Image (cartoon, coloured by chain):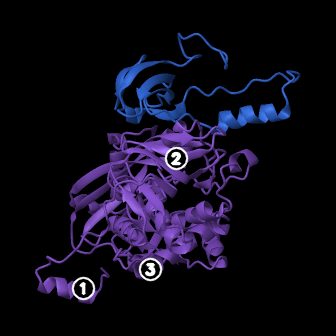
Amino acid sequence: MRIACPFCGERENGEFTYLGDASPKRPNFAVDSGESPEGVEDAFYDYVYLRDNVAGYMREYWYHGGGCRSWLIAERNTVTHEFRSVTAAPGVGAAKPVQAGE
Amino acid sequence: MKYSIFSLAKAALSGHKGWTRAWRDPAPKSHYDVIIIGGGGHGLATAYFLANEYGIRNVAVLEKGWIGSGNAGRNTTIIRSNYGLPGNTGFYEMSMKLWERMEQDLNYNAMVSQRGIINLYHSDAQRDAFARRGNTMRINGIDAELLDAVQIRKELPFLNYDSPRFPIMGGLLQRRGGTARHDAVVWGYARAADQRGVDIIQNCEVTGFVRDHNGKITGVETSRGKISAGKVGMAVAGNTSRVAAMAGMKLPIESHVLQAFVSEAIKPLIPGVITFGAGHFYISQSDKGGLVFGGDLDGYNSYAQRGNMPVIEDVCEGGMAVMPMIGRVRMLRQWGGIMDMSMDGTPIIDKTPIDGLYLNAGWCYGGFKATPASGLVFAHLLARDEPHPEAARFRLDRFRRGAMIDEKGQGAQPNLH
């Protein structure tokens, strides 16, 4: 598996550290959102513990610790290890920051 | 046919032409009391215990490929019960006791060999942690001995004791740990289950669940047609999320690839199992002579049953660091298996929220040693509708309750367990 870092070019995957599925978003409840405590608990349980564990293309976080030290989002097939795209994660370099939940 | 020295002698005299097949190849019936999805060690052991201990014999084991073609045939065959947390200690010791009588129970040579397992330590802090774990084991009636460097050197003179980074100060030894022949475990349970009336149906992939108007699972759709069932148990570690998704269930599990390696066969060299946790490396020697070794997960989600080069390099470096002479043998084969990594590193054996569907999953990379106990407690759950006392902590809702069993203290990051 080689990963095409948008900043450094194609590098071997030993340079990268894996975080996991990029789709779970941290729940963001305002104090007076009116959400029940159980609802908040459910949302956090889902965020922290439950995973789609996709067989196929999955968006996931990689960290290029052996290179530019950027967080990246890759689309990779978990069945074949093929990459479809690798882009900078929101908040990194040229990419526009995105709030969780957007 | 009962296997014994006499059956062997008799077959030898007739040129070994009299052997019959060890289990039948039945066509699926239209209904079973219990269907087990997954013909690995755990699924077959479950069927065996259902028939043998709980009197439920109208049972089918459905396997998409051939039995033992998943992780049962891809592990590094180690058995041990050196755990430290409540829930794990009792469960894995029960498994160890079942290993010790397995060959008599099944009338099958599973080559269970209690040649000992040593976990090396390299610092005062690690020694204290191992002393604590050893004490926990002994309080629970499990054998454990804390060895110092002199004692280890007597048993394993070939290790690198003077590494400046990881000097070997001693190790925690469980003498009753060891290895077993993984394929023989599968075949032994298959044959014993078959003899008790269980149908083992290979090349039969489950493609969906059949549900009644209340949502209860009443059977499965398979590549060989629809089969109805009183209860359905899943023992498909590696693919648990995919099968659960057919029932609309999302689980606290990720699938990861773990690689293993075997060298060319050499004369007896390593007496037992050696783990070098600090260097992400462990090794044993098979009865055939190959050095069997491995290390960490590759670290990324995968269903591919193959890994990548960085971990191969890492494992080989770990081997060279702790046992420099390993550099003189050639690697023969390398492969990958898909681990059901749970969010706390501990298995899940429980009823699911869906009526009629039962779950045996999340074995991380420790499923092989658990095979007999997993079968027994899952059979208990399926037969009695309540957890076996030794598996009462392996519940699916423990994450929500905050009752995790996190042996490594790593938190909800499956690739680090």
Name above or below for residue B97 compared with residue B124: below
Q: Chain of mark 2?
A: B
Q: Marks 1 and 2: which is nearer the front?
A: 2
Q: Tell me the number on the disc at residue B7.
A: 1
Which residue is disc 2 drawn over? B219
At a point 74% along the width and 35% down the height, the residue shown is A42
Mark 2 on the same chain as mark 3:
yes
Mark 1 on the same chain as mark 2:
yes
The colour assigned to chain B within the rendered structure: purple
Q: Nearer the viewer, residue B183 or B335?
A: B183
At a point 59% along the width and 38% down the height, the residue shown is B249
Which residue is disc 3 drawn over? B105
Provide the letter of the chain coloured blue: A
Q: Quadrant of residue A7?
A: top left
Mark 3 on the same chain as mark 1:
yes
Classify 10 Å Cα crowding around label 3: few (below 14), some (14-19), many (20 and above): few
| Residues at marks 1 and 2 touching, judged by CB atoms closer than 8 Å | no
